[in-house]
Amino acid sequence: MPIKEGVLNWKIMRRVVVTGVGIVSPLGTGIEKSWGGAKEGRSGIRTITRFDASTFPVKIAGEVPDFEPTTAIEKKEVKKMDLFIQYAMSASTMAFEDSGYKITEENAERVGVYIGAGIGGLPAIEHWYDVLKEKGPDRITPFFIPMVIINLASGQVSIKLGAKGPNSCAVTACATGTHSIGDAFRLIQNDMADVMIAGGTESTITPLCVAGFNAMKALSTRNDEPLRASRPFDKDRDGFVVGEGSGVLVLEELESAKKRGAKIYAEVVGYGANSDAHHMTTPSPNGEGASKCIELALRGSGLNKEDIGYINAHGTSTYYNDLYETMAIKKVFGDHAKKLAVSSTKGMTGHLLGAAGGIEAVFSVMSLKEGVLPPTVNHETPDPECDLDYVPNTARELKVKAVISNSFGFGGTNGVLAFKRFE
C-alpha cells in the first residue's frame, strides 16, 4: 500500500516499547536516587569540586555525587575509559539488567547500542595534553585515543554485553541523547534490530568547558546560591548550569517484549528531527524549528495533540531557549497548550549537554509509568513571556496518556520524542 506523501504510515511499522531504564545524574546514581530526587524537587547543583574554580566567574555545576565505576566495570578496565564512557557503562548496565533481556549466540546480532555524547572525552584531552607538555610524547597512555572517541561509549557497552547488532552514536550537541534514542527507535521499527540500548552520556566539568561556556555568557553566575541557580522559565534566570551523567533506555520490539513477559514502561510512538538553519547558538525566532520538530514527532504517532498531557521541556534556563520553546509549544498545541503540564528537570540536574535527552527520556518514561510529573524548581518569579503551566516547584500526581521530550542543540539541531502509556 503506498504511503501518502509526508505522512508516515505507522500501522505497518513494528511497535517499540521501553523495557529497561538506567541513569547516572547529579541527583545520584540509579533510578531510585535520580527519579526519587526529581519527584522531591531536589537540586543536584553544587560548588565545583572537580577542579579549582576559585578564580573562575562560574563556580557551580551538577556533578554526580556518588559514582562508583567498579559496579559496572572491571577495576583494571576503568583507567582505559574517560568518565563519559564510565557513566554510559553504568547506566547501560543498569538499564539492561532492569530489562531482564538475555543475549545469546542466536540473538546477539539483533541487539544493538546507540549512545552518543555532545563533547566526549574533554577531561582526558585536557589531562593528557598537560602530560605531553610537561613530560613529553613517550608518557602518553596507549589508551588515550579510545578514551576520547565518542563512539567508544557505544563500543564499550557492546563489548561488555556482547551486543553484535547496530553500533553507533549521535553527536548533536544538546540533542544527542534524544537523537540517539530516536535513531535507535527507527532501527527497530524498520526491522534492523529487535533490541537497542540507547541514550546519551557526558562528563565535561573541566576548566576548558566551563571557561568556554562562560565566555559565551551562557552560564549562571549565581555562585552563592547553587541550589537556586538553574531556574528554567523564571524571570530571574541568568543562564544554564553544566551537569554530567548518563541516561539510557532499553528499547525493544513489542512482540519480543510480550513473548518473554517483560515489564513495559511505555511505548515509543514518535520521533522528530530537523534543523533551524538559523544560527550557531541562538534558536530560530518564535521557536519555528522547534515547533516543526514537535509536529514531526507527532506525525504518524497515532496520537492527537490533545492526547499529550505532559512535556519534558528542553528548558535550559536561558532567555531565548525558554521563550522560544514556550512559543513553539503554543504554536503547535493552540488552545490545548494552556491545559498542558510543562516542566524542565534541568532546574534540578543542570544541563547535561549530550546526556540531557537521555536522562530526560528516562524521566518522561517514569512520569508515564508512575503518574507523577516532575517539577520545574526555582520557579519563583513568573516570566510574563513564559506563560504556560510549568509544574512550579512541586511534583504533581497526574496520569497522562502521552508525553513528549524536547531537545534543542547548538547548530540549530532539534530532536523530539513521543511516548505513550502502554495499554
Image (cartoon, helix red, strand yellow):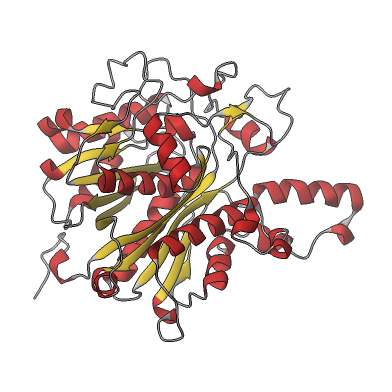
Relative image position of residue 340 (x, y in whole percent): 19, 33
Relative to residue 66, is residue 335 depicted above or below? above
Relative to residue 129, is residue 349 depicted above or below? above
Quarter occupied by residue 203: top right
Relative image position of residue 198 (x, y in whole percent): 42, 60
Residue 147 appears in the rendering: yes
Relative image position of residue 383 (x, y in whole percent): 32, 16
Relative image position of residue 18 (x, y in whole percent): 32, 59
In the picture, measured across the screen, residue 8 lies left or right of residue 128, that is: left
Along the line of sight, the residue nearer the viewer: 176 or 5: 176
Quarter occupied by residue 70: bottom right
Q: List the single residue furthest toward the top.
A: 381
In the picture, measured across the screen, residue 287 lies left or right of residue 157, that is: left
Say which residue appears at 63% left-offset and 54% top-offset: 69
Say which residue appears at 38% left-offset and 51% top-offset: 178
In the picture, measured across the screen, residue 118 lies left or right of residue 404, that is: right
Quadrant position of the N terminus in the picture: bottom left
Say which residue appears at 34% left-offset and 30% top-offset: 375
Along the line of sight, the residue nearer the viewer: 234 or 89: 89
Relative to residue 225, is residue 362 depicted above or below? below
Residue 286 appears in the rendering: no
Relative to residue 308, is residue 162 depicted above or below? below
Quadrant position of the C terminus in the picture: bottom left
Quarter occupied by residue 313: top left
Along the line of sight, the residue nearer the viewer: 4 or 158: 158
In the picture, measured across the screen, residue 110 lies left or right of residue 216, that is: left
